[in-house]
Image (spheres, rainbow, N blue to C red):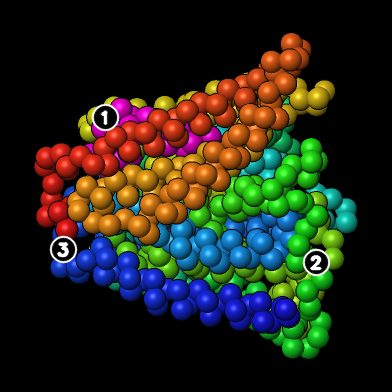
Amino acid sequence: MSLLLFLAASGVILALAYRWMGRFLTRYFRLDPSAPVPAHQQRDGLDYEPAKTSYLLPQHFSAIAAAGPVVGPILAATLFGWLPAWIWIIVGAILIGGVHDFASLIASVRHQGRSIAEVVGRYMNHRSYLLFLAFIWISLLYVVIAFADVTAGTFTQPAVADGSEAPGPAVATSSILYLLLAIVMGLVVRRTKLGENRAKLIFLPLVLGAILVGPSLPFDLGAITGVARPQMTWDLILLGYCFFAALAPVWLLLQPRGALGGYFLYVIMVVGVLGIVIGALNGTLSIQSPALGVSNFFTFDGTKPPVFPLLFITIACGACSGFHSIVASGTTSKQLSNEQDACPVGYGSMLLESFLACLSLATVMIVAKPAANPNLTYADGIAIFMNQASFGAIPVGVARQFGLLCFATFVFDTLDACTRLARYVFMEFTGWRTRAAHYVATLVSVGIPALVLALPPAVIDGKPKALWQVFWNLFGSSNQLLAALALLGISVWLGRRGRTPWFTLGPSIFMLVMTIWSLGLTLWQRSTIFTAPAAQAAHQMEFWVAAVLVVMALWIVVEALLLARQPAKPAPETAQVSR
């Protein structure tokens, strides 16, 4: 297969899927443009605020994307080869991920904009609801911890003489300017008659300028303040920012920042497509990496992970990710202005992310030996694409620095969105609805990450390691387990409304099998804790966390089976829910 054929096939298949599957989902869920939606019914300017599709789609796209469709596909292609990764990205997005995102969004819209756990609680039982809600909240806190520390590490990363890494202070400058521009754009759109489209035409080039100006005005917190641990200081600053951002009205930061981030991703995708097309036509770019890796398909030899089930855990964003159900039923459902917008926003954005994942795959495919760090592989590929798209006018070195800065700057977009989502979930869990509850829930949601980040690192095999990194592999499994359970909850909702949920139940079973299989491998690898008394505490904890995840998944499955044949319990519902 040529690189050009790979790109064309990816785009055509996804476009046809949107036309066919999108129409099916629209008919099945009986989307009604005249039906009342939470964004209008419960509009408060803080969380519930209707947004046009042109404003909400890029925001949702940037929220679910972040670094996921870059890191996962590149790692999977390096481990397993680009062909299995491509098949999972395309098939997974069309039949599993897109359905998961769309159904989570419309289920939330028809339940007053509540989280996907609310659907589980209403149609299963209170036990399952609380269990699922706690699982979601802990997952969100983990993301906040990990992304805060990753971002802080990026901001303090030293410059390297050969230019192989973007200096952290430059990224910090670009990120701060990016956020300030988003706030100004939100105020301009809200307070003037400029309009969203014209505002984007003004502020999108300014974001580009913010990224380019970063290296010229680096913000070196360590040098300025003289603190001994600048990364820890940045951790606390970022969490402080998250506290205020999660409480800010969505029109002030979340909507404009998401729109700018989403449209910037569009620009990067267009540049990638042009670069691949031009490079393929002039013979500069071709597929160099192997289609299949050296890993076995089903067996683990102790060094190389098997394709099944780890391919489906490694690639989440781009194919199917449980985190998407939290975003769809958290911030997005509270802004959907019209039920019919659920198709482009919920299903279409997943296919866009799938195409972005295909472009990430292309950055691996054009090199015979990818860099060990996915960030560098991505930056190398984007640099080559930009160079080709500009017919050599943009030097590869400059473009590579730009790719690194783009990657690092937009990774932290997820931070404040996750904090806001954690606030929603905490308030649902406690039942608090007062104004003070907003502050308490947000404070708890950033306070716990602050405490965890302040703890000393774990020592693994004689080397210090951040606590969140110890459980990174488990996070991938728990994220996909969340997708499986969300699909299961939606299947129960549809089934108890008298609908046949074959297209959600099948993917739910598949994802359950893959995640439990993956967790089983972790249990097998860490089972030495019973034969080696001196086993490290981190490995012991990893074993027990994996065991708890398996028990929780099986528990909810049993609950669903027990309730499958029961008639729907009476509950106060809107006209939307009954459809």
Label 3: which secondary element: loop
Residue at 70% across / 18% down in the picture? 529
Residue 454 image position (x, y, % from top left): 61, 23
Name the image quarter holding residue 475: top right
Residue 491 image position (x, y, % from top left): 32, 50
User: Which quadrant does the C terminus fall into?
Assistant: bottom left
Which is nearer the N-term, disc 1 or disc 3?
A: 3
Label 1: which secondary element: helix
Q: Residues within 10 Å of mark 3 (few under 14, many from 20)?
A: few
The amino acid pointed to by label 3 is Ala
Which is nearer the N-term, disc 2 or disc 1?
A: 1
Magenta-drawn segment: 117-144
Q: CA distance from mark 1 to mark 3?
A: 29 Å
User: Which quadrant does the N terminus fall into?
Assistant: bottom right
Residue at 23% across / 33% down in the picture? 433
Q: Camera-side residue: 122 or 456?
A: 122
Give the residue at mark 2: 289
Q: Give yes or no for residue 120 being in the magenta stretch.
A: yes
